[in-house]
Amino acid sequence: MESAVLPDDLATCHGMIREMAASLRDAQRQVEQLGHRLDLLLRRLFGPRSERVDPGQLLLFFGDGAEGTPDAVPAPESPVESPAPPPTGRAKGHGRKPLPADLPRERRVHELPPEQRACPDCGLDRSPIGEEVSEQLDYRPASLFVVEHVRVKVACRHCQGHVAVADKPPQPIEKGLPGPGLLAQVITSKFADHLPLYRQEGIFARHGVELSRKTMCGWMAQAAWLLEPIWRVMRAEVLKSRVIQTDDTTVPVLDRRLDRARTARLWVYLGDREHPYAIYDYTADRSRDGPERFLGDYKGCLQADAYSAYDRIYSRGVVEVGCFAHARRKFYDARTSDPQRAHEALARIRALYAVEATGKDLDEAGRLALRRERSGPILERLGTWLDEQSRFVLPKSPIGGAIGYARSNWAALNRFTEAGFLAIDNNASERAVKPVAIGRRNWLFAGSEGGGKAAAVLFSLATTCNALRIDPFAYLRDVLDRVSINPARKVAELLPDRWWAAHSESRPTPAG
């Protein structure tokens, strides 16, 4: 600037100053955006993934006792009760928990050696008068065994002919090596415990049996084909739900025509309390065709993020329910670039979740009444605040994007206050896609389109079993033994919850 020739005209100088100031603001905005993106990247790579915020920090922007803060949410009135008696014994949650009563037990009796049984006074042998029993938990590694199917042949000795042989019972894979227990173990290990096939290959090798991952991959495809009728009935049941929660995640898929893996999708659809199934659906991409094909003529409520692929589904009568966790996350990410506004929004949203925590044990009618009484005013103040702040922020800034997201989806975000069976967020479906994300780190990719579809079926059964606290191995072991001979009209009896009702002993007994 020292060598620059400045104009003598004062108005021109003022114009130059204004242009420079505008350029400086643009540069500053770019620096803030780049710094924000760098902060997100570093936090994603090296920082904790939790979205927790110190409640005391939120008070800096609201003040003690201000409206909308979590502390301002009144607790529900409850009848006066007599004080509870002081706890006796060990405090709840401390000490060793008793071992499940249904575990097999081996009794090992330890007696005094003969030289120590004599009475020190009279010298006679002392007699047993009781026992002291203590329990120790031990482990016996799983074992492989061979089932020999012996088919007895008969013939007529008199006629020297008419040979007949007993029929072999139906097998999960006709003329295949694996029994239902081995198939169930491989499925459970991969789709419930996230153990890829190449690691299972090594485990079986330690037992002295060579099973290649390619062979086991073929088993998974055939098992998924056998179990697909159950998947279809589960899908039909989910479509009867009053509300379905959905989310999706990526799945790399090998394509022999390309030198790299393609990015496909696994979508999860969660039914409501009366239809407690997690259904996964495989699609080759993230287009709207996948959800539209799966949902078909569904007319209930759909709770998802604000992905545009759902817009046409909403336009045909499906009720859109928003997710406050997605809205909150955008304010959380913006807290480094505009801490005051971001933390104020976080505090207001925290108040909504405080109301939800208060009503989590209520029935649908009670929860709806509580939301209308307490969440309604909080939402009204939050909506007014968003409208006011939108006039002072840049639309493409992080805080502007967060405010714009909340305002453009405001009706859907308020929908949970219209019915007691709706949730404030879509976190249940986000948790349901985590098994895919965890497993993806281990097995890395699906080998083909068919592998992706098989994974959708097997993930559906394994995840539903885990959600219902059913042992996936026990369920799959029994179902694989029966599904090939089960009449089509009775497939519904093999749904996890209905199977569990007939096999209640398979539910793990909670300790303590």
Image (cartoon, grey):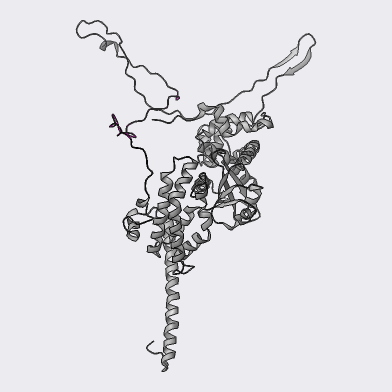
Compared to residue 130, the image places residue 243 above or below, namely: below
Pinpoint residue 361: horizontal percent, then vertical percent: 44, 40
Compared to residue 148, the image places residue 5 above or below, namely: below
Which residue is depicted at the point 59% across and 38% down? 216
Residue 33 in view: yes
* Nearer to us in this view, 13 or 455: 13
Is 95 contained in the magenta span? yes
Residue 259 in view: no
* Nearer to us in this view, 165 or 270: 270
Is 250 contained in the magenta span? no
Q: Left or right: 83 with respect to 281?
A: left
Which residue is depicted at the point 66% across and 55% down? 257
Pinpoint residue 131: horizontal percent, then vertical percent: 32, 16
Pinpoint residue 180: horizontal percent, then vertical percent: 59, 30
The quarter of the picture where residue 133 lies is top left
Pick the quarter of the image with the N terminus.
bottom left
Q: Please state the extent of the stretch shown in magenta in the rendering.
A: 81-104
* Nearer to us in this view, 144 or 331: 331
Q: In the displayed image of the protein, which residue is found farthest to the left?
A: 121
Q: Main secondary structure of the magenta part?
A: loop
